[in-house]
Image: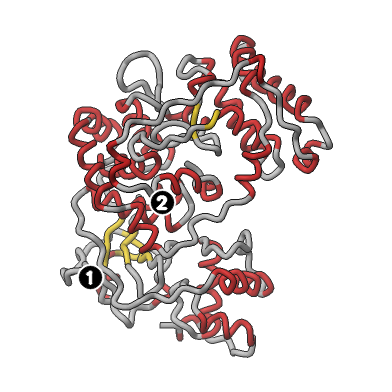
Amino acid sequence: MLKTRFAIAAAALLALCAPASAQLLPPPAKPAAPKATATKATAPSPRAASCHNGQSFDRFLADVKSQAVAAGVSQRTISEASPYLIYDQGIVNRDRGQRVFGQLFTEFAGRMAAAYRMQNGQQHIKQHAAAFARAEKEYGVPPAVIAAFWGLESDFGVNMGNLPTLKSLVSLAYDCRRSEMFVNETIAALKIIDRGDLTPDEMIGSWAGELGQTQFLPVHYVNYAVDYDGDGRRDLLRSEDDVIGSTANYIANGLKWRRGEPWLEEIKVPQNLPWDQTDLSVQLPRSKWAQFGVTYPDGRPLPNDNLAASVLLPMGRNGPAFMAYANFAAYTEWNNSLIYSTTAGYLASRIAGAAPMRKPAGQVAQLPFNELKQLQQLLVQAGFNVGKVDGVLGQQSRAAVKAMQIKYGLPADSWPTAELLARMRGGTAQAQPASAVR
């Protein structure tokens, strides 16, 4: 639900790569809750406490509880939750050992936006027509947009995770990577219990602490969950109406959705497009893109209007091409992995009735993992911040690739190629002005 979700979405997405038959299964049985008499914390890693001045986990947890009380959480809730607030080094290991979103977009979208998931989304919109209509009227978010996130995050409630949320949150809070963030998430989870939405034993979700059918982190659960079925609880695990209304509320008010505007459309780009303009940071009127020769996939012209849009090339100039509008920012804010956000937007368009995207004319070459990692290392040596050097093409890496493509006079489509890697290994090419890159 936020930019750090690039780092914590892997487990849920891997679980969703299931066949269509998985859609027909009931939600998995909830695992037994831990008992107060049997909760002995796993010995924390000494390294985990380095950012807490060597503070033990028990002492750290006491401080978190004090912060929760100061934030308004009752002592009753602290007592109810305490048996679940235990450290698990395995959760921390999973967080540190991720490698996500390293596939080609067409491969990832082919699985995650498969036809059965599109059809299931359409069926859910019909099944819950009243709630979807209400959400669109109140929040301005189209049913297809809600349904796409719902399908991607949990296959409509089938795969919500099976781990105790409080244990995951407090373990990640004690770890030093994102301690402050997960302390806040732990306190938010306690607030969810305090206001009666869920009990501690009901808090079962992903290993990263996300809850419910659209995988809300607890802070977003507290801020955006709504009681859409009128039963007095905001239950994002079991109430489909609450899921629909809450997801719409978050997209509209948390992610600033623009009512009545599009989000993502497939397009066809000419070979002489100014590739350096193809970036989410570049917004031009559709009339300007039309002048450049951009059309819809079937050759129909774009509207000759001033609606601002960006051209998005998730696999470079030889792969699929999309027109990304202002509302696409909601997708990159939900999850800043470009491969995830583009897939989510594409799935929403399919649920809304768009045709399947065209297959690339030829195979799009992808650098092997080791070479992509080497390219990132060379980009760092050249002075760029690419985030983690992990062999995964994130948005920082794409921006650095584009800058080097401009320097070397290559088509600046943000897609790493063997030619760019060879140029950077040699380091002898002369820089060319951006105007020369086409």
Amino acid beneath label 1: Thr
Q: Identify the image quadrant of the C terminus.
A: bottom left
When the figure is inspected, residue 406 is found, relative to residue 284, above or below; the finding is below
Q: Which residue is outermost to the right?
A: 54
Q: Is residue 203 left or right of residue 268?
A: right
Secondary structure beneath label 1: loop
Q: Is residue 260 left or right of residue 188?
A: left
Frontmost residue, 384 versus 206: 206
Residue at 18 percent across and 51 percent down: it is 353
When the figure is inspected, residue 186 is found, relative to residue 383, above or below; the finding is above
- Colour scheme: secondary structure
Q: Which residue is mark 1?
A: 295
Q: Residue 286 placed where, x, y %?
A: 27, 65
Secondary structure beneath label 2: helix
Amino acid beneath label 2: Ala
Q: Do residues under tags 1 and 2 come within 8 Å of each other at their CB atoms? A: no
Q: Residue 409 placed where, x, y %?
A: 50, 85
Q: Earlier in the sequence, mark 1 or mark 2?
A: 1
Name the quadrant containing residue 188: top right
Q: Residue 39 placed where, x, y %?
A: 67, 21
Residue at 74 percent across and 24 percent down: it is 63
When the figure is inspected, residue 27 is found, relative to residue 62, above or below; the finding is below
Tell me, for residue 329, which label it has, or none: 2
Tell me, for residue 304, which label it has, or none: none
Report, in whole angstroms, how far the alpha carbon at label 1 lies from the one at label 2: 22 Å
